[in-house]
Image: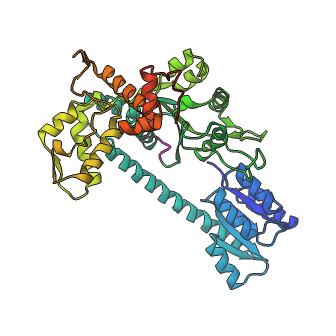
Amino acid sequence: MTKIKILVADDDASLRRVIEFKLNQKGYEVVTVEDGRQAIAELNRNRYDLLLSDIRMPGIDGFQLLDQSKQIQPDLQVILITAHATVAMAVEAVKMGAFDYLTKPFEDDALFNAIDKALKFRNLEDENRQLRRRLDGQEFFKNFVGVSKAYKDLLALIDKVAPTDATILLTGESGTGKEVVARMIHYKSHRADRPFVAVNCAAIPKELLESELFGHIKGAFTGAVKDKRGKFELADSGTLLLDEVSELTVELQAKLLRAIQERVIEPVGSEKGLEIDIRLIASSNVDLKARVREGKFREDLFYRLNIIPLVVPPLRERIDDLPVLIKEFLRRFAPGKNIDLDDKLMGRLENYDWPGNIRELENLTERMVILRKAEHLTLGDLPTDFGASGGKPPAVRTAENEELGFHDAEKKLIMEALDRAGWNRSQAAEHLKIPRHILIYRMKKYGIFYKKENPPRE
């Protein structure tokens, strides 16, 4: 059984030794420090169940330590010690988040009773957090519905791999629900009551990503005014999702590989490693094997991540799920309303390729619900730009009346939009009514490169 860890901060060396001795006799694991600065450094390095701190200390006093400790470890229970207790001081301590306070000199029973109550309260809070996380997980399950074979096969794989601690690599197109799948795996695992932390590697500037993942110590670089815990440490004992893992630089890939192999991370600027216990899930909407062949992704890291490969199918392979997904979205966006779709509208949706997958369907449903003319949705409720950049649109013909396939038609639309916008990608995306990053992705997909006479512009 894991020992309860207690941190004691007091500038009185003799009192520190006495408290440490008595708490060790009770079976607690105790670390003592002589002031607030040392206590903060220790809280940044290790997790504790309880902080026992004197109020009057040089530098950072007990109240300041209480405030900062709650920022570092929000669930930490704090008991303050003072030789000059007043009603005002007691009120202030409680308002700032202290569980209790003791007045010097105090009896052993008073100390042990205060600690016992604080730890019981912490356990109660843990149980409440676990319940909230499980309820959150059930809400995610509600949003992940289907009847298709592809859906059922995916669900069977989730049920099979969730109870293990094996690293999982989720692949699939944008908008297929990879993060939802990752959360389902977490909530069906033995780590369900521990943190689930997701980080989008593509959304964080590359120069900040290392600090975001592994944390940093004060003074590690310009702007590092205090220690910061990274996503790996925040996910300790739980699950960490690295979304768009393909966007990691080669240098960060090496550090990630070490973290996976040794279960140790090293914050930026620190020479001391931190042991971590996480379940790692990585996801990507690009072919990592191709990235390996191109020399842009480490082969050894790919095999470390690809222990359990799991492909999240695109919506066009789950067309049978369309009615139940739409029903779920209607329930969410129009609670208490009895909104339905006519057969022609459903047929139009079933004949669409859904390049944006479930995310696109969700956005479309919300849009139709908000702008609906009646409770019965028809083809007239479809946005005028629906299908402009994807799906199975009517055949497009050239001046020579030659039919183009869907992909040729989409490439033609993109080229026309870029020419019209003077190769300004933001304006072209706005014209096509698609996000800029989707436009860039499709340009790469179709091998559309900038003309020499038209340098790329934002």
Magenta region includes residue 189: yes
Q: Is residue 278 visible?
A: yes
Place of residue 92 in the rendered image (x, y in percent of width and height, measured from the top left): 66, 77
Front-most of residues 114 and 354: 354
Q: Is residue 403 left or right of residue 126?
A: left
Place of residue 19 in the rendered image (x, y in percent of width and height, measured from the top left): 78, 64
Examine the residues drawn in magenta and state their main secondary structure. Answer: loop
Q: Is residue 207 left or right of residue 270?
A: left
User: Is 254 above or below relative to 379?
Assistant: above
Place of residue 36 in the rendered image (x, y in percent of width and height, measured from the top left): 78, 62
Q: Residue furthest bottom?
A: 87
**What segment carries the magenta color?**
188-192
User: Is 410 above or below relative to 10?
Assistant: above
Q: Residue furthest front?
A: 453
Q: Tally the numbered discs.
A: 0
Q: Is residue 77 left or right of residue 447?
A: right
Place of residue 99 in the rendered image (x, y in percent of width and height, measured from the top left): 63, 70
